[in-house]
Image: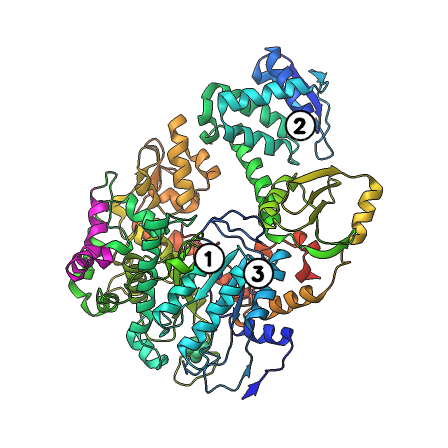
């Protein structure tokens, strides 16, 4: 093993950012905080990107590991104990200096600190806490901090970090408990879910005592509220097992009720979702596994007295990440797990990371054609549909059709299966009905609803409002008129048209060698409209 | 057919809003009025059968227009027209005028009436200018230089629109204890910030611009080099995608960015 102990700061930075780059979460969003006299930094609710690396991904935070030494041996990870790679460890001062000096020059929006496990989970978490403490209190940093909770670290340390951080994350790593057992033999689901639950209830407690502190609720939370569904928050979770079961059985039904009661022709949604009740047992088990006994991780916040409560506890919320395509899981399993995480753990974001076989490990998929970016893209689109559009996993996929269509985005795919709900009249349909039209996104639906108050809208207006007409035309009327009178709107015809559009794209990728050009959109760029 | 009347103004807020005032007061009929700004981007094609009026800038007239917009339309509409007035769009004066006319008829709803062409155009102009300002919050790079014996953070920008207000406000809140200078090379202006105070703006003389030009790259390279090292190693090779990078970070913003030097 190569130790780069006496490495220069630059060498360490290279090693420890290289080792952190597979973590896809790089957003600085979720909390808006003004600057403070004598301190450096503020935060913006939408987050701010500062550069784009050669892979086209946004750079917002100084994303580094504290150390890439690790006592664990997760098969998919470049830093696993048995790998022969250069190792390095920062000191807390080094991390603080880098963060401050980069921040002053507007290179970054803040720090994203993760780590390999050095000595023990607690020792690692202590080092992270030490760094965050120094950054906030000695260096007087008031900008954005995202840090990892190390699975297996004691609750006191997890809480401590939460008082300094804006966002925390515990990575799910693999979508299924089985996958985790096989690929990350030193971790188990419980170790991951326990801190997640602890952070969730800490946040809730902090919100009740201190207010939002500039933090915002998740898109999923807002969408649930708009649709009158049960809200993901800490309180309903802590009320004990009976309530949890209630919530669970509602989770397949609630959305359908919401949608069915909508005027405007979306009545038939229930047929799609119905599948999940018949055959879904095994797969839904994955989502069901995401329950913890109500006692786990809910001891409450204990360190109020020792901290500046000015920022609140984890005000920007928590996120997680799953590796896609390393185990054998289906898209349906993945989306069910995401949905459960949004609903039961009140997560802000679930990130998906196309598996890259960095270790050339024979027990893992070889993926000749590169990482499964297209699949990752579909998952991001579907995730968007859950969080902003009010779709449920069970509407988009089912056990009998467990994977997304390669040729069609999930929303078009859904709409084609529900032609009886269309066309929708632009001038009268309600917001949630508009949202379900392919080619109409969150922004354009909002603009339509506002603009039509001052006059009837026609096709010529829609384009300027950001509606993607070449997709939407098959599903809408304006003042009772379809765009092409002669158009015989049936499923086959539209499918051919829509697939044609995407095939163009595919041809383009194959020719240009730059595979998946527009598909590796991240975070900011992903919109499933 | 009634002749068009064309109000010609200079590219300053005062001149533009005076034109709006004069045109509105004339009662000539909105459909027959056009406003033209004298700027390099505008095509100066003299139209026959049109009457030309050259506007004399008047600060009072501007104040009256702006006050009325705030009172009778909305704060949002006010922001739209101010941002539009600072933009580089050659049709801006005409759009502002007709937008205000609709605004008086529709009240605060005008900013949502996107089916009206001039409102749509206003929205476009506004969005473009705001987007540019936002780009600079992201991509502006400071270096630490020595200025009159102080360590000062110094940045150069070359924006198309007037963005310096938004940029300086942003960093005044963010870098509260720092000295900083943001130099807008395209408009020969600079914003100066002293620790814990508000920032102030200076119009610059040509020799001042030259002095500021020379300061670029005069600071220490240590952190710039560390940043470049980070920038290189954070990219995932298997996902390399120059096209996407260019879409997200257009080439012309890279001119003053540390990591592209
Ligand atoms: S715990 Fe597993 S995933 Fe994390 S650094 Fe160690 S080997 Fe890698």
Residue reaching furthest to the right: B207
Q: Is residue B111 left or right of residue B145?
A: left
Q: Is residue A409 visible?
A: no
* Spot occupied by residue A194 in the image (x, y as percentages of width and height): 30, 68
* Spot occupied by residue B86 in the image (x, y as percentages of width and height): 65, 34
Q: CA distance from mark 1 to mark 3?
A: 30 Å
Kindly identify which residue carries mark 1. Answer: A523
Q: Image quadrant of ligand 1?
A: bottom left
Kindly identify which residue carries mark 2. Answer: B13
Magenta region includes residue A238? yes
Report if the CB atoms under discs 1 and 2 are less than 8 Å apart. no
> How many numbered badges does the structure rendering display?
3
* Spot occupied by residue A367 in the image (x, y as percentages of width and height): 44, 76
Q: Identify which residue, A376 or A477, lies in the foreground.
A: A376
Circle 1 marks a residue in which chain? A
Mark 1: few/some/many CA within 10 Å (<14, 14-19, 20+): some
Q: Which residues are magenta?
A: A236-261
Kindly identify which residue carries mark 3. Answer: A139
Residue at screen point 59% across, 82% down: A5
Circle 3 marks a residue in which chain? A
Q: CA distance from mark 3 to mark 2?
A: 43 Å
Q: CA distance from mark 1 to mark 2?
A: 38 Å
Q: Is residue A494 left or right of residue A102?
A: left
Labels 1 and 2 positioned on one and the same chain: no
Give the overall secondary structure of the magenta segment: helix
């Amino acid at each position: 093993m190569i130790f780069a102990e006496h490495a220069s700061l630059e060498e360490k930075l290279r090693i420890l950012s290289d080792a952190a780059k597979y973590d896809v979460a790089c957003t600085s969003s979720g909390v808006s905080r003004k600057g403070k006299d004598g301190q450096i930094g503020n935060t913006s609710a939408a987050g701010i990107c500062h550069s784009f690396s050669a892979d086209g991904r946004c750079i917002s935070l100084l994303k580094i590991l504290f150390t890439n030494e690790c006592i664990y041996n997760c098969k998919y990870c470049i830093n696993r104990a048995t790998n022969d790679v250069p190792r390095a460890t920062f000191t807390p001062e080094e991390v603080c200096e880098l963060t401050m000096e980069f921040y002053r020059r507007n290179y970054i929006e803040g720090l994203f600190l993760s780590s390999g496990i050095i000595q023990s989970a607690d020792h690692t978490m202590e080092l992270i806490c030490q760094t965050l403490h120094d950054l906030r209190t000695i260096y007087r940093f008031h900008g954005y901090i995202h840090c990892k909770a190390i699975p297996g670290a004691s609750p006191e340390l997890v809480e401590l970090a939460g008082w300094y951080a804006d966002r925390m994350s515990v990575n799910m790593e693999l979508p299924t408990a089985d996958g985790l057992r096989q690929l990350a033999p030193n971790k188990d689901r419980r170790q991951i879910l326990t801190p997640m639950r602890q952070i969730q209830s800490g946040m809730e407690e902090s919100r009740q005592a201190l207010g939002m502190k500039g933090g915002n609720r998740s898109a999923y939370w807002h969408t649930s509220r708009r649709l009158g569904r049960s809200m993901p928050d800490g309180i309903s979770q802590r009320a004990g097992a009976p309530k949890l079961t209630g919530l669970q059985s509602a989770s397949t039904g609630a959305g359908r009720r919401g949608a069915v009661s909508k005027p405007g022709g979306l009545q038939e949604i229930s047929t799609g979702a119905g599948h999940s009740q018949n055959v879904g047992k095994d797969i839904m088990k994955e989502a069901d596994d995401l329950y913890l006994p109500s006692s786990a991780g809910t001891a409450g916040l204990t360190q109020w007295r020792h901290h500046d409560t000015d920022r609140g506890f984890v005000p920007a919320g928590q996120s997680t990440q799953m590796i896609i395509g390393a185990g054998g899981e289906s898209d349906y399993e993945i989306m069910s797990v995401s949905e459960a995480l949004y609903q039961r753990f009140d997560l802000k974001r679930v990130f998906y990371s196309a598996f890259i076989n960095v270790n050339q490990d024979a027990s893992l998929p070889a993926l000749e054609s590169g990482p499964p970016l297209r699949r990752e893209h579909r998952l991001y689109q579907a995730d968007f549909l859950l969080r902003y559009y009010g779709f449920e996993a069970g509407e988009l996929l089912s056990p009998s059709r467990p994977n997304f269509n390669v040729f069609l985005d999930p929303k078009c795919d859904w709409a084609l299966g529900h032609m009886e709900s269309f066309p929708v009249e632009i001038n009268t349909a309600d917001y949630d009905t508009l949202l379900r039209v392919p080619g109409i996104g969150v922004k354009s639906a909002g603009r339509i609803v506002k603009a039509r108050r001052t006059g009837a809208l026609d096709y010529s207006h829609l384009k300027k409002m950001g509606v993607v007409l070449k997709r939407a035309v098959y599903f809408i009327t304006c003042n009772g008129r379809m765009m092409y009178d002669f158009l015989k709107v049936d499923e086959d015809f539209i499918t051919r048209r829509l697939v044609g559009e995407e095939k163009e794209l595919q041809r383009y990728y194959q020719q240009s060698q730059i595979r998946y050009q527009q598909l590796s959109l991240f975070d900011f760029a992903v919109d499933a409209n | 057919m009634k002749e068009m009347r064309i109000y010609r103004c200079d590219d300053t807020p005062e001149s533009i809003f005076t034109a709006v005032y004069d045109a509105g007061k004339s009662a000539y009929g909105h459909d027959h009025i056009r406003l033209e700004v004298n700027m390099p981007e505008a095509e100066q094609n003299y139209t026959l059968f049109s009457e030309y009026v050259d506007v004399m800038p008047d600060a009072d007239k501007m104040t009256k227009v702006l006050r009325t917009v705030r009172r009778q339309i909305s704060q949002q509409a006010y922001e739209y027209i101010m941002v539009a007035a600072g933009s580089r769009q050659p049709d801006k004066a005409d759009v502002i005028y007709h937008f205000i006319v609709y605004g008086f008829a529709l009240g605060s709803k005008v900013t949502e009436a996107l089916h009206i062409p001039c409102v749509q155009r206003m929205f476009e102009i506004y969005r473009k200018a705001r987007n540019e300002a936002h780009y600079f919050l992201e991509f502006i790079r400071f270096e630490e230089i020595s200025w009159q014996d102080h360590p000062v953070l110094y940045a150069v920008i070359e924006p198309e629109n007037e963005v310096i207000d938004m940029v300086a406000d942003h960093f005044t809140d963010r870098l509260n204890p720092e000295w900083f200078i943001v130099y807008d090379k395209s408009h020969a202006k600079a914003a100066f910030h002293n620790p814990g105070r508000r920032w102030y703006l200076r119009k610059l003389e040509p020799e001042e611009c030259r002095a500021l030009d020379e300061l670029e790259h005069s600071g220490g390279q240590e952190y710039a080099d560390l940043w470049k090292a980070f920038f290189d190693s954070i990219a995932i090779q298997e996902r390399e995608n120059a096209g996407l990078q260019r879409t997200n970070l257009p080439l012309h913003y890279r001119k003053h960015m540390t990591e592209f030097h």
